[in-house]
Amino acid sequence: MFRINENYLKLPGSYLFSNIAKKVNAFTAAHPDKPVIRLGIGDVTQPLAPAIIDALHEAVDEMAHEETFHGYAPDLGYEFLRNAIVEGDYKARGCEITADEVFISDGAKCDSGNIQEIFSLDNKIAVCDPVYPVYVDTNVMAGRTGTYDPKSEIWSDVIYMPCTSENGFAPELPRETPDIIYLCFPNNPTGAAISKDRLQEWVDYANRVGAVIIYDAAYEAYISEEDVPHSIYECDGARGCAIELRSFSKNAGFTGTRLGFTVIPKELKCGDVSLHGLWARRHGTKYNGAPYIIQKAGAAVYTPQGRRQVQEQVAYYMKNAKAIYQGLKEAGYSVSGGVNAPYIWLKTPDGMSSWEFFDYLLEHANVVGTPGSGFGPSGEGYFRLTAFGSYENTLAAIKRIQSM
Amino acid sequence: MFRINENYLKLPGSYLFSNIAKKVNAFTAAHPDKPVIRLGIGDVTQPLAPAIIDALHEAVDEMAHEETFHGYAPDLGYEFLRNAIVEGDYKARGCEITADEVFISDGAKCDSGNIQEIFSLDNKIAVCDPVYPVYVDTNVMAGRTGTYDPKSEIWSDVIYMPCTSENGFAPELPRETPDIIYLCFPNNPTGAAISKDRLQEWVDYANRVGAVIIYDAAYEAYISEEDVPHSIYECDGARGCAIELRSFSKNAGFTGTRLGFTVIPKELKCGDVSLHGLWARRHGTKYNGAPYIIQKAGAAVYTPQGRRQVQEQVAYYMKNAKAIYQGLKEAGYSVSGGVNAPYIWLKTPDGMSSWEFFDYLLEHANVVGTPGSGFGPSGEGYFRLTAFGSYENTLAAIKRIQSM
């Protein structure tokens, strides 16, 4: 008789965003007259930029003719895209990354969930708390996290690095030595950024203790401050300890178009085994590439027009972020984030729990946000709003919250 | 110090098709004057059908406007596609499958590689031999296959079901009871099909011993004979024991467009845990959906025009299959497959090994095929040719082989 992966059963409840969707669906079914404004999930709302649309149409036309048709993509992704990435994201910032260290994928969620597979099950992970749930949940599913205590909402074999208002939402080096460190800056969910000096400390630490850093830079396009690094490879020694994950979802509106990439420098090794080789093997065996037309769309992001257009889009969302930040401040909330990230992180008022505030906000302002506790125990008492709505909706939501 | 997943190191050599690519690249570099005809990888060559191209352009235009833009897709995939699949692939054949049992993905390779994750590591898998390498390799990477004997090319904890000319390339029920049975019909690589009666025996067997069948039906569009089932759900009791994998790659030319789906009936359970729930959890946690525009393209395959056009394409490839089959027969080869599948399976002449014949064919006919031994020990002494070339190239390849 076949048996299931029992680790799946250890996962408490279902995925955060599925829960939110259920609650919102129930509310709208009960109150069809109350239009809900969604600032919950980090999903973009602005259409794809014209340069991307043009590239998509062109690529579709190529697929219509035998001479220009494209079948299976090369294992790592098309060179035209990997070269554009190296030029635009790395060389331009003085980072020494080559095209054959870039693995094109269908998004950072998949990569951040799958990357743990190339590591042994007895590695100990460290995560910021609060944190993007995928890092922890995928390690739970693999059986790497020990037992769960429903009361504290803590896994016995996970090292939590609290990020709260007390430490400015910046994790401190953990007391217990981890093997794998997940870092995400600019941060989801808190919107906090890290300075280059602070990130260098993490790189030095990882090299010192022999840990690998999985660096999720999905939000780098939102960085507005000078001393905030766009890539971990801006730090000395990062090639020996860090994997970087990138996404086209938030900088170019690809949440429904699906494209991302992972960088693994060739000198990142465990003994004489290169992680690059392991990930290449996984990519070749369990994945079959992002669609050709989508990779062409991705390359359009790096053209002069494409770049200008997506920068305008980022600016649009950051105008929202500013409006939310200031609007909440004016309403008396304690707020952070929103400067180098499209996320605003607020302290729930009057000692409400995160889910209490979720229900309260949905009920009284008909606004959907994300409960901070969904991101980890230290997220309790916090709440995330995203800047990805339309400007009109964002202003309307703030107005509703202010008059709540 | 972090440690790697040592199971990866157990994998012998690199992925079959990467090896072939390396050999072919070396040959073409050394002989730029000799144009190579590729009938190796099962990659399509005909352009996407007009109905699919139209759907892609329309969907791209939708992505260009805020009102019709699509962000994150629903977890299981868009309902318009899942409904079309249920109507076109299941109801039409009398199979009782509902839209919420269909999980849209970016292809059957990923699904067939990932599906093992929801099972315990102590499950024993059974595979046909020869077999599509992904089934075995992904179980190796998970640590489910025991130790490898390089001499016999056999994993200690895998049940091999030989498919050779002696049994008409049809596996017999295994003597040792497996937990998970991988079946692929029409078969890759042998091109063999299974009758409905024989598949019913497998379903009855799985229900009897408590095994789950992972049924890869990626080639069902190539079935030409009446008594060959298109879906395992045509068999009684399959809803209680079978997962079905489907692909748009071969029936609609999506190898570079990426779309597939997995069906898990809700009553397929281990104790009171439904596999549907586990896969839904994996889908929601580690995957983020196929692109909206690609899902629209997939739905176009089920329209009357789309269906007609892709059927013409399948007929085009099957004309190639017939030409290869007959051409090789005339040249004195022992050949099978090619009737319900786009693959022709031939016995290597003069006791050559599969790789010897690969080199011989590349050298003397400048034709690329796939060595049977790459698919498992019982594939030794066999060779696969695919019908996915252009008709002109296919005829030219056969002519070259005949005059070799």
Image (cartoon, coloured by chain):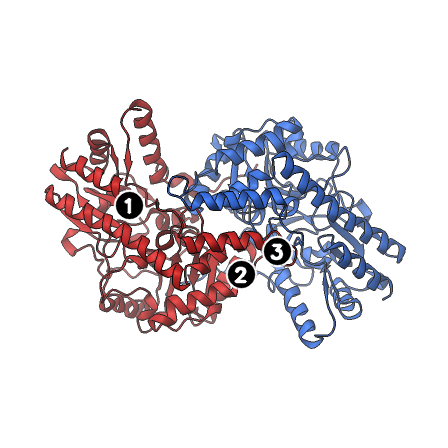
Chain colours: A red, B blue
> How far apart in space, not on screen, are marks 3 and 2 (Cα)?
26 Å
Q: What residue type is labelled 3?
A: Phe
Residue receiving disc 2: A281
Are labels 3 and 2 on one chain? Answer: yes
Tell me, for residue A177, which label it has, or none. none
Q: What secondary structure is marked by label 3? A: loop
Pick whichever, B15 or B247, lies toward us: B247
Are labels 1 and 3 on one chain? Answer: yes
- Chain of the residue under label 1: A
Task: Give the number of the mark in front: 3 or 2.
Answer: 3
State yes or no: discs 1 and 3 in contact (Cβ < 8 Å): no
Residue A253: x %, y % from top left: 38, 50
Q: What residue type is labelled 1?
A: Phe
Q: Which amino acid does label 2 sit on?
A: Arg
Which badge, 1 or 3, is on the more N-terminal residue? 3
Residue receiving disc 3: A69
- Chain of the residue under label 3: A
Q: Residue at x 39, y 64 (%)?
A: A304
Which badge, 1 or 2, is on the more N-terminal residue? 2
Residue A49: x %, y % from top left: 39, 52
Left or right: B121 in relation to B369: left
Mark 1 crowd level (few <14, some 14–19, many ≥20, 10 Å Cα): many
Residue receiving disc 1: A375
Q: Residue at x 66, y 73 (%)?
A: B26
Pick whichever, A191 or B187, lies toward us: A191
